[in-house]
Image (spheres, rainbow, N blue to C red):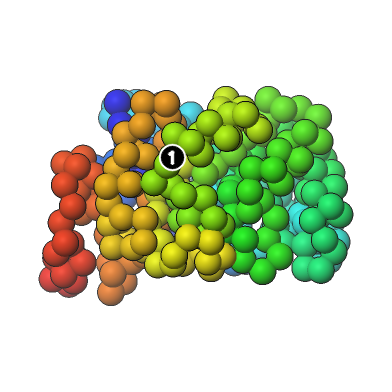
Amino acid sequence: MLLIGSHVGYKKDTGILGSLEEALSYGENTFMFYTGAPQNTMRSPINKDIVNKALDLMKKNDIDKNKIIVHAPYIINLANTDKYEFAVSFLKEEIKRCEELSMKYLVLHPGSHVGLGVDVAIDNISSGLNEVLKNSTVTILLETMAGKGSEVGKNFDELKRIIDKIDNKNLIGVCMDTCHLNDSGYDVSAFDEILDEFDRKIGIKYLKCIHINDSKNTIASHKDRHENIGFGEIGFDNLIKIIYNDRIKDIPKILETPYVLDKAPYKMEIEMIKNKKFDSNLIEKIKDTH
């Protein structure tokens, strides 16, 4: 079964139930959300009644709660020593929120070293992760990064070095991002070769999620600018081959493509993916829905 979804909203009043209902309106059987704004620390309490209603609705729609993804806020940076204690503390709180929501996976950007160098950054990241994963039931998924600025995690070697230092390896994994892979220098048209390399260096069992995004940039540009499916440098056919690759059929695929005139494109993009047929008029059709 194709596991396909997108980033959806999370609002104070409706919580994860609103997120689920948005995902269902797009024809999704998984989804990803932030438990609050990704750019700040403002968080509303988790309403257990809403969580229970959401879990019941998931069951009615044959959605596996263990295939839903939470994304940690961007402001967490474990790679640098500036505000390091804050980053560890806030990440602990995000893990607690995931546990209250009955969610299993939390995607995290490894962080940027901001001049400290990759070696120090990897030590910082692994130390922080070992601290937050104590007594945790949530698995942290390190995201593959585009290599913009001083980002850590731009290749499998850096991710491996972090994972090797994690005490409880049952609570660590990886989330690939197709745009980030392309922008960091991986040729995603040869995705099986990428999976082979990942398996050799890290182990395919650690791959738990894939962000499906086209890219506005050519390979190895290190810019990280997402594009709608089929309208970028990666292309529709290459993304379809990734989405339907049998080796990752049980892994959630999550769209994070740009809104079009403030309109979510996901319903139409997912229909296109399910039909396996590119619609060059997709952007105009989304615009026409306004």
> What kind of residue is marked 1?
Phe
Camera-nearest residue between 27 and 3: 3
Say which residue appears at 68% left-offset and 25% top-offset.
170
State the SS at label 1. helix
From where the camera sits, is residue 244 visible? yes
Say which residue appears at 71% left-offset and 65% top-offset.
150
Q: Quadrant of residue 214?
A: bottom left
Camera-nearest residue between 136 and 139: 139
Q: Is residue 266 left or right of residue 207?
A: left
In the rendered image, the quadrant that contains the C terminus is bottom left
Up-down relation of residue 43 to residue 39 (above or below): above
In the rendered image, residue 103, in percent from the top left (x then y), is placed at 54, 35
- Callout 1: 10 Å neighbours few (<14), some, many (20+)? some
In the rendered image, residue 167, in percent from the top left (x then y), is placed at 81, 29
Up-down relation of residue 117 to residue 107 (above or below): below
Q: Is residue 281 left or right of residue 125?
A: left
In the rendered image, residue 63, in percent from the top left (x then y), is placed at 35, 30
Kindly identify which residue carries mark 1: 191
Say which residue appears at 36% left-offset and 32% top-offset.
245
Camera-nearest residue between 83 and 44: 83
In the rendered image, residue 137, in percent from the top left (x then y), is placed at 66, 29
Q: Quadrant of residue 199?
A: top right
